[in-house]
Image (cartoon, grey):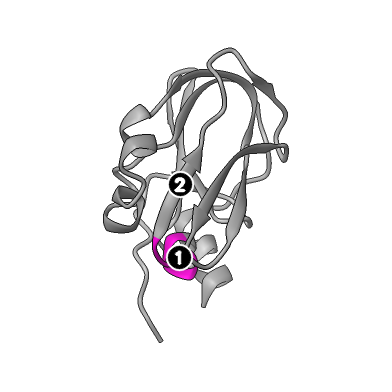
Amino acid sequence: MIMTEVPEGLNYTKTHEWYRKDGNTATIGITDYAQSQMTDIVYVDLPKVGDKKKAGDVLLTIESVKSAEDVYSPITGTVTAVNEEVAKHPESINKDPYGSWLVKMAIESEGEHLSASEYRKLIQ
């Protein structure tokens, strides 16, 4: 079994997104487990700043050599920033999934989320 990294201090979803709260802002990405399942990521279709999403809505799509996967919004809110560097260098998600954030959103409300220990149990 491959060990995947699950840092403490982040919130996780059952659909393999992570987010970090900083005041009223959520920084969102995909987990190490998700990137390892997708293998080589080749394209990220980011949303637009100003897009409004509800928790559970498709936030963006990531394509790998293996598949195209939807990334779901873990919160209800508005996109305030997108990581253009990830769009230019999508392989950075494979190298550092927790450093390669995808979007930042202003939080209106949070959806269901898991702690690091709960997420570890989910992916075992």
Describe the element under mark 1 as helix, strand or loop: helix
Tally of numbered discs: 2
Q: If the image is split into quadrants, where does the N terminus sit?
A: bottom left
Give the vertical position of 94 relative to 81 (above or below).
Answer: below
The residue at 29%/43% (across/down) is: 99
* Highlighted range, magenta: 35-40
- Residue 112 lies left or right of residue 121; in this view the side is right
Closer to the camera in the image, 71 or 123: 71
Residue with the mark numbered 2: 43
Give the vertical position of 48 relative to 62 (above or below).
Answer: above
Residue 108 in view here = no
The residue at 63%/18% (across/down) is: 51
- Mark 2 or mark 1: which comes first in sequence? 1
Closer to the camera in the image, 98 or 7: 98
In reply to whether residue 84 is colored magenta, the answer given is no
Q: Residues within 10 Å of mark 2 (few under 14, many from 20)?
A: some
Kind of residue indicated by mark 2: Tyr
In reply to whether residue 39 is colored magenta, the answer given is yes
Residue 30 in view here = yes
**Label of residue 123 in the image:** none
Residue 35 placement (x, y as % from top left): 43, 60
Label 2, label 1: how far apart the Cα atoms are: 18 Å
Closer to the camera in the image, 43 or 112: 43
Residue with the mark numbered 1: 33
Locate residue 111: give its quadrant: top right
Describe the element under mark 2 as helix, strand or loop: strand
The residue at 39%/63% (across/down) is: 40
Give the vertical position of 25 relative to 86 (above or below).
Answer: above
The residue at 36%/46% (across/down) is: 90
Kind of residue indicated by mark 1: Tyr
